[in-house]
Image (spheres, rainbow, N blue to C red):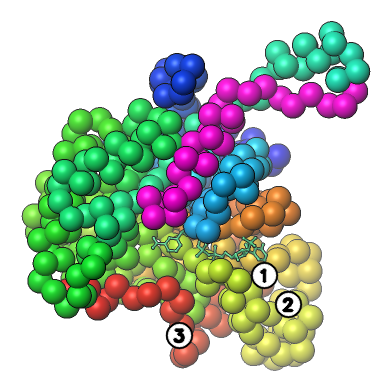
Amino acid sequence: MFFVSLMRRVKETVVFKREFVTNNSLSFSYRGRMSSSSSTNNNFNNNERTTTIEISPNVFMPRLAFGTYKLKGAQCTKAVKKALEIGYEHIDTASIYKNESDIGEALEEWMTTTKTATKDDDDDDENKKKTKEKNFERKMPFLASKIAPAEMHSKLLVEQSVEKILLRLRIPAIDLIMLHWPGVSKVSPDSEIHKEKRKDAYRALEKCLKEGKIRAIGVSNYHVRHLEELLSYCEIKPSVNQIEAHPMWPQEDLIEFCESKGIAVVKYSPFGGGGAPLLDDVFVSTREEEKEGGGGGGDEEREQAADIADDQAWKPSQILLAWGLLRGGRKNRGNSKTLCGAVVVKASSEERILENYEALEKDFFNSKYLSRKLEVWDSVETRKKFAWDSDCVK
Ligand SMILES: NC(=O)c1ccc[n+]([C@@H]2O[C@H](COP(=O)([O-])OP(=O)(O)OC[C@H]3O[C@@H](n4cnc5c(N)ncnc54)[C@H](OP(=O)(O)O)[C@@H]3O)[C@@H](O)[C@H]2O)c1
């Protein structure tokens, strides 16, 4: 696949030996990510894509993550394996999703099984043997999980939760763990208790990082004031802030703040979450609607944009993912030549998992259709948030 070969060219990979914690004590090769381009230089063009962000020294986070909220059991295991086969290199989960064991199963199968024999191979023992010997090139994806508000009540609880995450995922160390929310469960949002609890919880993550159980630590759903408070006492700066962000909820001020502090932003719910409400939104209209006048501007211009879109065959889902990979803080607005952070997207079917991944193959920097969409979205006045807002947490 075009993108996969591009990734190989852009990145040098360093192979570590890592013990896989399974009943059989299997071990496998772990490929850490070493990007040939620096994290601060994230401009790219069609020939040179920077597909990862260095979120902490030598910790490279791939920009497109496969989200797993609401995926459970066999469906989750199957979807994660499919995502890995397609090429996703970053899997996002959380303790609260209750699917880490299913993901652990997918990872173990992914890392240890050989290519599935075809029907013809089944008919021929010798061929079957040869096929089994031919392993796909497999590497561990970047793994991210989150500590739930119910696990933030004490430092000890956080440390125990980290251990449990590792056990469920069947790995000895994880790339990234975030605090899922700036507060603890079962306490009124306006209580002062949250400040103390999230401080202790973050301290516990710092400890786990020093012990080598986590390679990078971060937060999720933190607003500027939560981050300012954290930056005033943290020993290790948060590597990421995972937040809801899409054209209807662009969070430019928060993203700008994160950029100024060197905190990578991971944008979640690019389609507005379950049921993908943004895909039906007028701003993600189809090219036919665009021709009918959805985007503003003169007729000729509209037709031209629609023709370009036809050429490039952007799907609405891919346009939304492009927004997520391009749009940053307010200052960065209008600069569509720089990537900003990462995006995490969830899908269940093979077709959708692939369609979303193929967004990475589109021409982000020379598409008039995309530029036009970005402009339209930038000028929207009505905004809409889909997930619960943590702004109420003191
Ligand atoms: N940190 C946090 O607090 C937080 C909060 C929310 C989400 N997240 C993370 O972010 C991930 C993504 O966000 P999300 O799950 O809320 O929502 P999302 O990725 O915006 O959208 C998921 C929805 O879009 C549908 N979909 C996916 N690809 C599609 C396509 N190509 N065409 C049409 N429909 C498509 C999915 O349907 P099917 O599944 O039926 O295919 C699902 O209903 C989560 O899974 C989770 O990992 C984090």
Q: Secondary structure at mark 1?
A: helix
Q: What are the residue bounds of the magenta stretch?
A: 93-120
Residue that appears at 57% across and 47% down: 73
Residue toward you, 320 or 368: 320
Which comes sooner in the sequence, label 2 or label 3? 2
- In which quadrant of the rendered image does the N terminus lie? top right
Q: Are marks 1 and 3 in contact (CB under 8 Å)?
A: no
Residue to which mark 3 is pinned: 383
Q: Amino acid at mark 1?
A: Pro
Q: Label 1 vs label 3: CA separation?
A: 19 Å
Say whether residue 234 is left or right of residue 26.
left
Q: Where does ligand 1 appear, by image quarter?
A: bottom right
- Residue 286: mark: 2
Q: Secondary structure at mark 2?
A: loop
Vertical comparison of 274 with 131: above or below: below
Instruction: Give the class, few, some or many, for how many residues have Cα within 10 Å of label 2's Cα (few <14, many ≥20).
Output: some
Residue 316 horizontal/vertical position (percent) = 67, 70
Which comes sooner in the sequence, label 1 or label 3? 1
Q: Secondary structure at mark 3?
A: loop
Instruction: Give the class, few, some or many, for how many residues have Cα within 10 Å of label 3's Cα (few <14, many ≥20).
Output: few
Residue to which mark 1 is pinned: 316
Q: Amino acid at mark 2?
A: Thr
Q: Are marks 2 and 1 in contact (CB under 8 Å)?
A: yes
Residue 170 horizontal/vertical position (percent) = 43, 31
Asked whether mark 1 and ligand 1 are closer than 8 Å, the reply comes as yes
- Label tally: 3
